[in-house]
Image: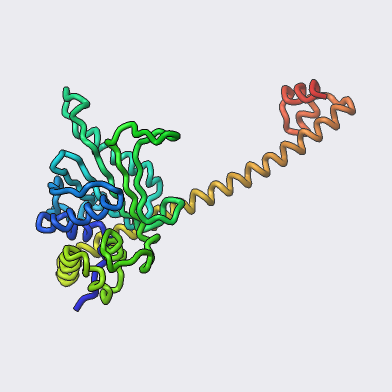
Amino acid sequence: MNELLDPRNDFLFKRIFGSEENRDVLLVFLNKTFIEANRPPLTEIILLNPYTEKDAPRDKQSILDIRGKTADGELINVEMQLFNKYDTEKRTMFYWSKLYSGQLQEGQSYKMLKKCVTINILNFSFLPNNQYHNVFHLREDRSGIPLIDDMELHFLELPKLGDHAVPVESGGLVNWLLFLKGIDKSNWEVLTMNEPVLKKAMDTLEFLSQDAEARRLYEDRQKYLHDEASMIEGALAEGEARGEARGEARGEARGEKKKAVQMTLELLKLGVDKAIISKASGLSEAEIIALSKQN
């Protein structure tokens, strides 16, 4: 039997949570997320971009997110991010704004705009706290008065979730996140004790792990994600190296300029002709005249 695939792979994540046959799995996951944010549970979710064969990772640039609509018209976007692409906050705001503004057709009133919720599941630490679940809204800084309830951003950070961060026997969001994080299969029974729908997600993962075509597509996507992460890390390292080199060069240049200024001041005291000083120091005659006025 093949070993289990990693559910954090965005292609596999969408197969498990974003297919029509697993819409109930997505609904329960969303409700567990919202309960922690003190929101009432959803009664229905309509998939706007359900998984299809077109989602196969042959298009390397595709974003395999999940988009849904509630009975009230609220839009929800769920995305798994296996590697840190950096600028996470700006990337989140960009995609949220596209989701929000994309609701209106030409000539429609702004009143037609519905609330948009983004849920980012991160396989890396992002925010400077110990909370694995952070929620953001638009509120006034001092009084906490909400400006509008149309924006809601969730960040679920898997690395902050230790195996014993909270009791798993009572069920809840943490059990779903531990499953995604890749908790040992021997602990699955404990996770599903009070989360029966989670068992369906686990069964889907086991089925896909044994499916040859799903495994091939998963490995294609995994390779792309790893290559992309390596390129980003390489570009950052190269940028830092160039920055250090430029800093050293600027430091050397500043040192040379300081020596030239000191030399010029000494020669000015001796009454040396400015043209000669310019040739000796490398400073322009205008710079030399300015120095002579300062002293």
Q: Quadrant of the C terminus?
A: top right
Residue furthest bottom in the image = 1
Q: Position of residue 107 (x, y in %)?
A: 16, 22
Residue at the image position 43 percent from the left and 35 percent from the top: 141
Q: Nearer the viewer, residue 250 or 233?
A: 233
Q: Position of residue 161 (x, y in %)?
A: 37, 62
Residue at the image position 40 percent from the left and 49 percent from the top: 86
65 over 280 or under it: above or below: below
Residue at the image position 41 percent from the left and 52 percent from the top: 126
Quarter of image, res 114: top left
Colour convention: rainbow
Residue furthest right in the image = 270
Q: Quadrant of the N terminus?
A: bottom left
245 over 256 or under it: above or below: below
Q: Is any part of residue 193 visible from this angle? A: yes
Q: Position of residue 263 (x, y in %)?
A: 81, 35
Count of marks placed on residues = 0
Q: Position of residue 167 (x, y in %)?
A: 33, 66
Q: Is any part of residue 83 visible from this angle? A: no
